[in-house]
Amino acid sequence: MNYQISIWPLAAVLISLIGSIPIMLSDRSPNLRESWTLLIAFLKVVIVASLLPTVLAGGGFQFTIAEVIPGVPLALRVDAMGMFFALVASSLWFFTSVYSIGYMRSLDEHGQTRYYASFAVAISATLGVAFSANLLTLYLFYEMLSLSTYPLVTHHQDAEARQSGRKYLTYILGTSIGLALPAMLIVYSLAGTLDFKIGGILSGTGASPQTLALVLVLFLFGFAKSGLMPVHGWLPAAMVAPTPVSSFLHGVAVVKVGVFSVLRVIFHIFGPEQLLAVNLGWVITTLASITILVASLVALTQDNLKRRLAYSTIGQLSYMILGAGMLSAVGMTGGLLHIAMHAFGKITLFFCAGAIYVAAGKKYISQMDGLGRRMPITYLAFFFGSLSIIGMPPLGGFISKWNLALGAIESGHLILLVVLLVSSLLNALYFFPIVYRGFFLPAAQGEPEGIKEAPVFCLVPLSVTAACSLILFFWPSVFYRLAQLALGL
């Protein structure tokens, strides 16, 4: 692949980091602060989108920031896989920024300047992960994301928030330092490089199957943001954060950074052929299958809407890892596609949960009877998001799950097809009752009559992301092309 040396990858990463400064300086002027937020989010999308045509044509961009270790620079590279993730993250950050204005103002939340500034730093770290040229750069931005999202998780500053924040950092930093960092050192000692390469840098190193298995397991659990059980406990705990944070954490940034890091390791550190040769795909698919089924069963038991969505997220993340572990072209493509399809569907669901809380003050599903008739736009968007996550046409989630199902057949592991079908049924069982209760059950006695749709700044983003889930069913070609280029197909 031909990579052009360009400052634009660095600009895409830094614009929101630098933008956090005027956001903080505008503390006494909410309108100016939020204008800065929207301007920075818009410019970030524009910069990322401007790089897309070159990548779709088979090219790319690179920029070396500094030579940290001989042969392992701190460097950025825009390739197809990075562009795939950056396109999803930057576009959804813009919608989250719009949504945040309606949500935070409606509830008159404290610490809004800290909130917007932390968000800006977090999206910089996310783009840094997407555009990392090697494992060291990815690792540093991964840690930057962990630290920058801590103030978001602990936003409410009460005892529950602080306890959840400690749990969040313990899981995320403990695993990355204790597991992923040693794995990275082993990779460097074996390959003499940490650069990402289609086909993997460990191919031809002569490493034993036992060593490769150890490194693989260290990475799978070391990047705990991916939510694999049993290192998933931070994710439900993070639900104490404001809903826009949950939307971005669970729909886009933190969790997808974890999955993206795992997929980078599978595709561009090990390489599918190497994993097939030493028969390690079953390790990945077994861990992913267990997580998918257990998380879906736990989601069924949750009455708190955000917690149900959190456990749903844990299961859905493992669909992406499951696809990668199939080590078949179609399955791996499906795993990558699910990053985008899930992101638009799940952020819609979290936006809807926040809109319900803003408009009706309700967190629990058992209290939401009849709300759909008073908030029809929100509940219709929730229905669309649910269909996408379940994997039903005509929503985007069907496209990724169809590829995953074909991948299970192609790889000859029909048990994985059973996992996909059973889990999709469980998805329907924990989503459809929410919609049914909202539209078809009568409201509880004594329910206030004045409940209506949330403010327009909340309503528009959830409507747009729901529409995007529909559009992606009919026009998924950009993400298809990026996924195929990322896999060297």
Image (tube, rainbow, N blue to C red):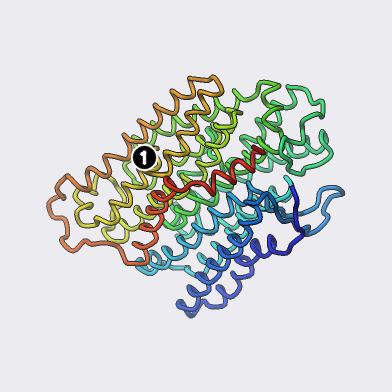
Q: Is residue 83 above or below residue 455?
A: above
Q: Amino acid at mark 1?
A: Pro
Give the x, y percent position of residue 476: 48, 46
Quarter containing the C terminus: top right
On screen, residue 467 above or below 323: below
Q: Whole-percent x and y of residue 112?
A: 47, 68
Determine the residue positioned at 34% across, 39% down: 302
Relative image position of residue 116 (x, y in whole percent):
51, 66
Could you tell me if residue 282 is visible in this image? yes
Instruction: Give the labeled residue for mark 1.
Output: 393
Q: Name the outermost residue toward the left.
A: 445
479, 272: nearer the viewer: 479
Q: Nearer the viewer, residue 206 or 407?
A: 407
Quadrant assignment, res 387: top left
**How many numbered circles does the render carry?**
1
Horizontal placement of 186 versus 342: left or right? right
User: Relative to 471, is 41 on the left or the right?
Assistant: right
Q: Is residue 55 left or right of residue 454?
A: right
